[in-house]
Image (cartoon, helix red, strand yellow):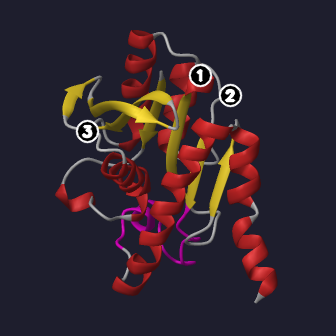
Amino acid sequence: MYIIVGLGNPGKPYEHTRHNMGFEVIDRLAKRYDIQVTERKHRAFCGKGMIGGQKVMLMKPQTFMNLSGESVKSAVDFYQTLPEQVIVVYDDVSLEPGQLRVRTKGSAGGHNGMKNIIALLGTQDFPRVKVGVGAKPERMDLADYVLSHFSKGEWEQMEETFDEAAEAVCVLLAEGAAAAMNRFNAKKTRETEAE
């Protein structure tokens, strides 16, 4: 079984903030595949179903971002899941808004949720889908920036990105990492070159 984890912070004040991209993508997958992400276990909201011919559990950790690893580790230990069967979806300030990056491994890149997951799993060799939210303005604190909301116009653009990120997860599951990286990592670069 694959565990698909969307990172975010629980609670109304954090809804639709830049740091909650993972939750948004999990919501899209849940809707598309009719998976109820309502069961409370592993300090997360969870739901099981099938995507791309694979058994999956969708997870939205409720630990707050910095402790996301506690939730992930609990599920991995319980289901005895291999690290390569854990797919993490999260926000990335080093990518332009709307840009996606699929990776099979890598460092946390300064992301506290990922730092905690890597520390508790004891490896950084697991797939992830990064959702670009853009670099922080010069004089703004990074924590304030990632907890800020998108403007209405930005949000409308991001809606499309959430669907694409959900599709990237589906391709990862059905066709593998190489196919997902081919399709989604080059996409924005090609579009930019074409403009």
Q: Residue flagged by tag 2: what amino acid is it?
A: Asp
Q: Are marks 1 and 2 in contact (CB under 8 Å)?
A: yes
Q: Pointer 3: what residue? A: 37
- For badge 1, the amino acid type reads Pro
Residue depicted at x 47% and y 21%: 1
Q: CA distance from mark 2 to mark 3?
A: 26 Å
Query: Is 187 rendered above or below residue 184?
Result: below
Would you identify the image quadrant in which residue 14 lies?
bottom left
Percent x, y of residue 190? 78, 74
Please, what is the dominant secondary structure of the magenta stretch? loop
Q: Which residue is mark 2?
A: 125
Q: Residues within 10 Å of mark 3 (few under 14, many from 20)?
A: many
**In this rendering, the label closer to the viewer, 3 or 1:** 3
Q: What amino acid is found at the position of numbered circle 3 in the picture? A: Val
Rounded to the nearest whole Å, what is the CA distance between mark 1 and mark 2? 7 Å
Residue 83, can we see it? Answer: yes
Give the residues in magenta: 132-149
For the residues carrying marks 2 and 3, which lies nearer the camera in this image? 3
Instruction: Please rate how many residues cluster around mark 2, counting C-alpha atoms within 10 Å: few if below 14, some from 14 to 19, many from 20.
Output: some
What residue is rendered at 35% in x and 35% in y? 59
91 relative to 153, above or below? above
* Residue 176 is a magenta residue: no
Q: In screen coordinates, is 38 left or right of 130?
A: left
Disc number at residue 83? 1
